[in-house]
Amino acid sequence: MIFDSHAHYDDKQFDDDRDDLLCSMRENGVGTVVNVSATYESCERVVDMAQKYPFMYAAVGIHPDEVGSLDEQRFARIKELLKKDKVVAVGEIGLDYYWDNESHELQKEWFIRQLDLARELDLPVNIHSREAAKDTMGIIKEHGMGLDGVIHCYSYSKEMAEEYVKMGYCIGVGGVVTFKNGRRLKETVETLPLTSIVLETDCPYLAPEPYRGRRNDSSYIKYAAEEIARLKGISYEEVVSQTEENARRLYRI
């Protein structure tokens, strides 16, 4: 069964049909979903949703675009949520220099603190990095060594991906691998061992071809799996089976 290692089903784009959509996952070949928070408010929502849906787990953390909302009281609440049943990772955390919603120094501060929290609680991390390759790598080398984790929505070079894999991290691959302009990610997939790749949607964002530009959901992840199979010259079934095993190992499910 497909394991979607990174989704955002608390997003308002799912408000009209969330329950119907999630209840149809098994018939679409999706067996497990990790629902990932981004804002402080979404941390509570993803934990609640993981309790409601048997196939769903939660990751709790603050996206770099949202770290301006954090203070000590809220950080303490996040720590408590990370101890809840079915919360399997700290995420989505990291750096985003594309949108630059928050200062780079503030992003770095809260990235490091959330990495330290993951180490304290012995949890894997789900890392966002956009236009921040050098700083992300530097912080992980200093503060993230020895942690289990995934570099979500990977967008950098195949050489950097290989370096992350040597450090024990997985690489998150989703709809972008199907894009005509996704050559860099295609090259990364061709280079990496399948044992270091996890499937993800980042839904409702980044729908694959032939649905690019529409609302994404976990049932579309099959198109990414098909492209990975084509790039690596293996069967679709092998991609689904191995990436599920990888995600279960990563999240300790």
Image: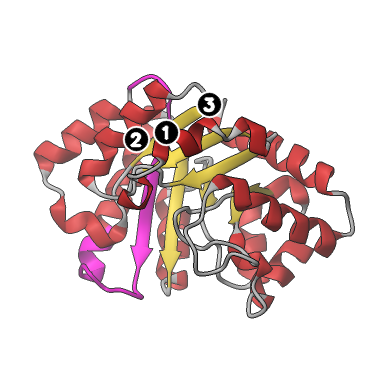
Q: Residues within 10 Å of mark 3 (few under 14, many from 20)?
A: some
Where is residue 190? Give x, y as percent. 78, 65
Real-space CA distance between mark 1 and mark 3, rounded to the nearest whole angstrom: 13 Å
Residue 133 higher or lower than 232, as above or below: below
Mark 1 lies on residue: 19
Residue at 46%, 60% (x, y): give it: 205
Mark 2 lies on residue: 46
Real-space CA distance between mark 2 and mark 1, rounded to the nearest whole angstrom: 14 Å
Residue 55's disc is: 3
Q: Between 87 and 170, which is closer to the camera in this rendering?
A: 87
User: Which quadrant of the structure image shows residue 182?
Assistant: bottom right
Give, as a single range, the part of the protein colored magenta.
84-108
Residue 249 shows up from this direction = no
Identity of the amino acid at label 2? Answer: Val
Residue 231 higher or lower than 52, as above or below: below
Identity of the amino acid at label 1? Answer: Asp
Question: Under tag 1, what secondary structure?
Answer: helix
Residue at 27%, 28% (x, y): give it: 81
